[in-house]
Image: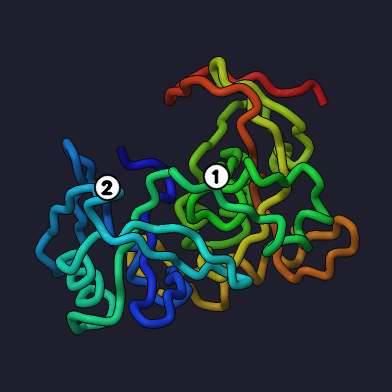
Amino acid sequence: MLKDRCLVVYNEETKAFQTARNFPRLLLIETKTNKGGFTLISPGTVPLGITIPKLGNSREDYVVMWNGEKVFTIDCGDEAAEWISKTLLGYCYGLRLGYHDGSCKRDIRKFHSRYIEMYPKLKRATSGKYSDLSTILLLTDSSVNDVISRVTNVSKHNFRPNIVIGGANIEPYSEDNWDRIKVGDVVLKSVMPCPRCSITTIDPESGLHNEGFEPITTMKKYRKLTKYNSGLSYPNLGVYMSVEHPGRICVGDVVYIPDN
Protein backbone atom coordinates (compact mmCIF):
# COMPACT_ATOMS: atom_id res chain seq x y z
CA MET A 1 0.00 0.00 0.00
CA LEU A 2 1.24 3.49 -0.86
CA LYS A 3 1.15 5.97 2.00
CA ASP A 4 2.06 9.65 2.13
CA ARG A 5 5.80 10.35 1.68
CA CYS A 6 6.68 6.66 1.24
CA LEU A 7 8.73 7.17 -1.94
CA VAL A 8 12.15 8.81 -2.18
CA VAL A 9 14.71 9.54 -4.89
CA TYR A 10 18.31 9.12 -3.77
CA ASN A 11 21.83 9.28 -5.19
CA GLU A 12 23.15 5.88 -6.23
CA GLU A 13 26.64 6.49 -4.81
CA THR A 14 26.24 8.86 -1.85
CA LYS A 15 22.74 7.67 -0.82
CA ALA A 16 21.76 11.34 -0.34
CA PHE A 17 18.04 11.98 -0.74
CA GLN A 18 17.04 14.28 -3.58
CA THR A 19 14.28 16.88 -3.55
CA ALA A 20 12.87 19.57 -5.81
CA ARG A 21 15.63 21.82 -4.47
CA ASN A 22 18.02 19.69 -6.53
CA PHE A 23 15.61 18.71 -9.28
CA PRO A 24 12.60 21.04 -9.71
CA ARG A 25 11.28 18.63 -12.36
CA LEU A 26 10.35 16.29 -9.51
CA LEU A 27 7.27 18.46 -8.99
CA LEU A 28 6.02 17.46 -12.44
CA ILE A 29 6.05 13.72 -11.70
CA GLU A 30 2.64 12.21 -10.94
CA THR A 31 2.02 8.95 -9.11
CA LYS A 32 -1.08 6.88 -9.82
CA THR A 33 -1.84 3.84 -7.73
CA ASN A 34 -3.10 0.51 -9.00
CA LYS A 35 -3.52 -2.96 -7.57
CA GLY A 36 -0.18 -4.03 -6.13
CA GLY A 37 1.76 -1.10 -7.49
CA PHE A 38 1.86 2.38 -8.95
CA THR A 39 2.65 4.23 -12.16
CA LEU A 40 5.06 7.15 -12.55
CA ILE A 41 4.05 9.78 -15.12
CA SER A 42 6.06 12.79 -16.26
CA PRO A 43 5.76 15.11 -19.30
CA GLY A 44 7.82 13.89 -22.25
CA THR A 45 8.40 10.39 -20.86
CA VAL A 46 6.78 6.99 -21.24
CA PRO A 47 4.85 6.13 -18.03
CA LEU A 48 6.40 3.38 -15.93
CA GLY A 49 4.46 0.81 -13.95
CA ILE A 50 6.18 -0.39 -10.77
CA THR A 51 5.29 -3.24 -8.44
CA ILE A 52 5.56 -2.23 -4.78
CA PRO A 53 8.77 -3.89 -3.51
CA LYS A 54 8.62 -6.18 -0.51
CA LEU A 55 11.10 -7.12 2.18
CA GLY A 56 12.82 -10.39 1.35
CA ASN A 57 12.22 -10.01 -2.39
CA SER A 58 13.96 -6.67 -2.97
CA ARG A 59 17.22 -5.06 -1.94
CA GLU A 60 17.25 -3.17 1.34
CA ASP A 61 19.17 0.10 1.41
CA TYR A 62 19.28 3.38 3.30
CA VAL A 63 18.84 7.02 2.41
CA VAL A 64 20.83 9.88 3.95
CA MET A 65 18.43 12.64 4.92
CA TRP A 66 19.37 16.10 6.19
CA ASN A 67 21.72 16.35 9.18
CA GLY A 68 23.11 12.94 8.21
CA GLU A 69 20.07 10.94 9.34
CA LYS A 70 20.04 7.48 7.72
CA VAL A 71 16.55 6.22 6.90
CA PHE A 72 15.59 2.71 5.81
CA THR A 73 14.41 2.10 2.25
CA ILE A 74 13.59 -0.78 -0.09
CA ASP A 75 15.01 -0.29 -3.58
CA CYS A 76 12.39 -0.26 -6.35
CA GLY A 77 14.66 -1.95 -8.89
CA ASP A 78 16.80 -1.13 -11.90
CA GLU A 79 13.93 -0.23 -14.24
CA ALA A 80 12.67 2.39 -11.81
CA ALA A 81 16.21 3.68 -11.29
CA GLU A 82 16.73 4.04 -15.04
CA TRP A 83 13.40 5.86 -15.48
CA ILE A 84 13.99 8.35 -12.65
CA SER A 85 17.60 8.95 -13.77
CA LYS A 86 16.58 9.62 -17.37
CA THR A 87 13.74 11.89 -16.25
CA LEU A 88 15.86 14.01 -13.91
CA LEU A 89 19.43 13.65 -15.20
CA GLY A 90 18.95 12.91 -18.88
CA TYR A 91 20.88 9.63 -18.75
CA CYS A 92 20.05 6.18 -17.40
CA TYR A 93 22.11 5.97 -14.21
CA GLY A 94 22.95 7.93 -11.07
CA LEU A 95 19.67 7.90 -9.14
CA ARG A 96 17.59 5.24 -7.41
CA LEU A 97 13.97 5.11 -6.27
CA GLY A 98 13.26 3.87 -2.74
CA TYR A 99 10.09 2.77 -0.96
CA HIS A 100 9.38 2.74 2.80
CA ASP A 101 6.93 0.08 3.99
CA GLY A 102 6.66 1.50 7.50
CA SER A 103 8.47 -1.44 9.12
CA CYS A 104 11.19 0.78 10.62
CA LYS A 105 10.62 3.91 12.69
CA ARG A 106 12.80 7.00 12.51
CA ASP A 107 14.36 8.54 15.61
CA ILE A 108 14.56 12.27 14.97
CA ARG A 109 15.86 13.09 18.45
CA LYS A 110 19.52 12.62 17.57
CA PHE A 111 19.52 14.43 14.24
CA HIS A 112 17.00 17.21 14.84
CA SER A 113 17.64 18.11 18.48
CA ARG A 114 17.58 21.84 17.69
CA TYR A 115 13.95 21.69 16.66
CA ILE A 116 13.03 19.39 19.54
CA GLU A 117 14.52 21.85 22.03
CA MET A 118 12.45 24.65 20.51
CA TYR A 119 9.29 22.58 20.13
CA PRO A 120 8.90 19.98 22.92
CA LYS A 121 5.77 18.49 21.31
CA LEU A 122 7.93 17.22 18.45
CA LYS A 123 8.40 13.53 19.27
CA ARG A 124 9.79 10.44 17.61
CA ALA A 125 6.25 9.24 16.87
CA THR A 126 5.52 12.49 15.03
CA SER A 127 8.01 11.88 12.24
CA GLY A 128 6.94 10.39 8.94
CA LYS A 129 8.77 8.15 6.52
CA TYR A 130 10.60 10.66 4.31
CA SER A 131 8.97 13.89 5.45
CA ASP A 132 11.27 16.43 7.09
CA LEU A 133 9.86 16.40 10.62
CA SER A 134 6.20 15.41 10.66
CA THR A 135 3.74 13.31 8.70
CA ILE A 136 0.94 15.87 8.59
CA LEU A 137 1.09 19.45 7.30
CA LEU A 138 -2.10 21.42 7.83
CA LEU A 139 -3.06 24.74 6.22
CA THR A 140 -6.19 26.85 6.13
CA ASP A 141 -7.63 28.25 2.91
CA SER A 142 -7.72 31.69 4.51
CA SER A 143 -3.96 31.65 5.18
CA VAL A 144 -3.16 30.64 1.62
CA ASN A 145 -5.56 33.23 0.24
CA ASP A 146 -3.86 35.93 2.29
CA VAL A 147 -0.49 35.00 0.78
CA ILE A 148 -2.05 34.94 -2.69
CA SER A 149 -3.39 38.47 -2.11
CA ARG A 150 0.20 39.65 -1.62
CA VAL A 151 2.04 37.54 -4.21
CA THR A 152 1.09 36.64 -7.77
CA ASN A 153 1.50 33.22 -9.42
CA VAL A 154 1.18 31.28 -6.15
CA SER A 155 -1.38 28.65 -5.12
CA LYS A 156 -1.82 26.23 -2.23
CA HIS A 157 0.09 23.66 -4.29
CA ASN A 158 3.28 25.68 -3.72
CA PHE A 159 2.99 24.79 -0.02
CA ARG A 160 2.17 21.06 -0.41
CA PRO A 161 -0.24 20.52 2.52
CA ASN A 162 -1.92 17.15 2.95
CA ILE A 163 -4.82 18.62 4.97
CA VAL A 164 -6.52 21.91 4.03
CA ILE A 165 -9.19 23.42 6.29
CA GLY A 166 -11.81 25.76 4.84
CA GLY A 167 -14.50 27.83 6.52
CA ALA A 168 -16.11 31.24 6.22
CA ASN A 169 -15.17 32.38 9.73
CA ILE A 170 -11.55 31.20 9.87
CA GLU A 171 -9.11 34.08 10.10
CA PRO A 172 -5.80 33.87 8.20
CA TYR A 173 -3.06 32.11 10.18
CA SER A 174 -5.44 31.07 12.95
CA GLU A 175 -3.99 27.56 12.72
CA ASP A 176 -0.88 28.98 14.43
CA ASN A 177 -2.86 29.01 17.69
CA TRP A 178 -4.70 25.70 17.48
CA ASP A 179 -3.51 23.22 20.06
CA ARG A 180 -5.83 20.43 18.92
CA ILE A 181 -8.51 20.00 16.30
CA LYS A 182 -10.95 17.24 15.45
CA VAL A 183 -11.56 16.18 11.84
CA GLY A 184 -14.35 13.62 11.63
CA ASP A 185 -13.40 11.24 14.44
CA VAL A 186 -9.67 11.99 14.25
CA VAL A 187 -7.99 14.24 16.81
CA LEU A 188 -4.85 16.06 15.65
CA LYS A 189 -2.38 17.83 17.92
CA SER A 190 -0.28 20.79 16.79
CA VAL A 191 3.46 20.10 16.99
CA MET A 192 5.21 23.13 15.53
CA PRO A 193 4.87 25.77 12.79
CA CYS A 194 6.17 24.76 9.38
CA PRO A 195 9.22 26.77 8.23
CA ARG A 196 8.93 27.25 4.47
CA CYS A 197 11.92 26.54 2.25
CA SER A 198 12.93 27.33 -1.32
CA ILE A 199 10.71 24.60 -2.80
CA THR A 200 7.76 26.97 -2.33
CA THR A 201 9.38 29.27 -4.90
CA ILE A 202 9.06 26.66 -7.67
CA ASP A 203 5.93 26.75 -9.83
CA PRO A 204 4.42 23.25 -9.41
CA GLU A 205 2.82 23.48 -12.85
CA SER A 206 6.00 24.32 -14.81
CA GLY A 207 8.88 23.30 -12.55
CA LEU A 208 10.41 26.77 -12.99
CA HIS A 209 11.49 29.14 -10.22
CA ASN A 210 9.30 32.17 -9.56
CA GLU A 211 10.83 35.60 -10.08
CA GLY A 212 12.14 37.39 -7.01
CA PHE A 213 12.30 34.23 -4.87
CA GLU A 214 8.58 34.53 -4.21
CA PRO A 215 6.62 33.87 -2.06
CA ILE A 216 9.53 33.58 0.42
CA THR A 217 10.68 37.19 -0.09
CA THR A 218 7.27 38.64 0.74
CA MET A 219 6.52 36.20 3.56
CA LYS A 220 9.79 37.05 5.30
CA LYS A 221 8.42 40.55 5.86
CA TYR A 222 5.60 39.36 8.10
CA ARG A 223 5.79 35.60 8.76
CA LYS A 224 9.28 34.95 10.18
CA LEU A 225 9.72 32.49 13.02
CA THR A 226 10.36 34.18 16.36
CA LYS A 227 9.71 31.39 18.87
CA TYR A 228 12.59 30.97 21.33
CA ASN A 229 14.65 33.47 19.30
CA SER A 230 15.45 30.59 17.00
CA GLY A 231 17.39 32.72 14.55
CA LEU A 232 15.91 30.76 11.65
CA SER A 233 15.50 32.89 8.56
CA TYR A 234 12.54 30.98 7.14
CA PRO A 235 8.99 32.34 7.18
CA ASN A 236 6.37 29.92 8.43
CA LEU A 237 3.04 28.92 6.93
CA GLY A 238 0.89 26.08 8.21
CA VAL A 239 1.51 23.74 11.12
CA TYR A 240 2.90 20.26 11.55
CA MET A 241 0.43 17.98 13.32
CA SER A 242 0.53 14.58 14.99
CA VAL A 243 -2.30 12.07 15.35
CA GLU A 244 -3.58 11.91 18.92
CA HIS A 245 -6.65 9.79 18.15
CA PRO A 246 -6.55 7.81 14.88
CA GLY A 247 -9.46 7.20 12.57
CA ARG A 248 -10.71 7.97 9.09
CA ILE A 249 -11.02 11.41 7.51
CA CYS A 250 -12.75 12.34 4.28
CA VAL A 251 -13.04 15.41 2.08
CA GLY A 252 -15.89 17.53 3.42
CA ASP A 253 -15.69 16.30 7.03
CA VAL A 254 -16.81 18.69 9.76
CA VAL A 255 -13.82 20.19 11.57
CA TYR A 256 -13.97 21.18 15.23
CA ILE A 257 -11.53 23.89 16.27
CA PRO A 258 -10.89 25.58 19.65
CA ASP A 259 -12.82 28.71 20.56
CA ASN A 260 -9.63 30.77 20.77
Secondary structure of the residue carrying tag 2 is loop
Name the amino acid type tagged 2: Lys
Q: Residue furthest left?
A: 46
Name the amino acid type tagged 1: Thr
Give 239 or 10, whichever is nearer the viewer. Answer: 10
- Expressed as whole percent of the image width and height from the top left, the position of residue 190 reads 71, 37
Residue position marked by numbered label 1 in the rendering: 135
Q: Residues within 10 Å of mark 2 (few under 14, many from 20)?
A: some
Label total for image: 2
Residue for point 63% across, 41% down: 125
Q: Residue furthest right?
A: 229
Give 242 or 27, whichever is nearer the viewer. Answer: 242
Establish if 203 lies above or below 4.
Answer: below
- Expressed as whole percent of the image width and height from the top left, the position of residue 33 reads 23, 42
Placement of the C terminus among the 4 image quadrants: top right
Residue for point 69% across, 32% down: 189
Residue position marked by numbered label 2 in the rendering: 54
- Expressed as whole percent of the image width and height from the top left, the position of residue 238 reads 64, 47
Residue for point 79% across, 60% down: 225
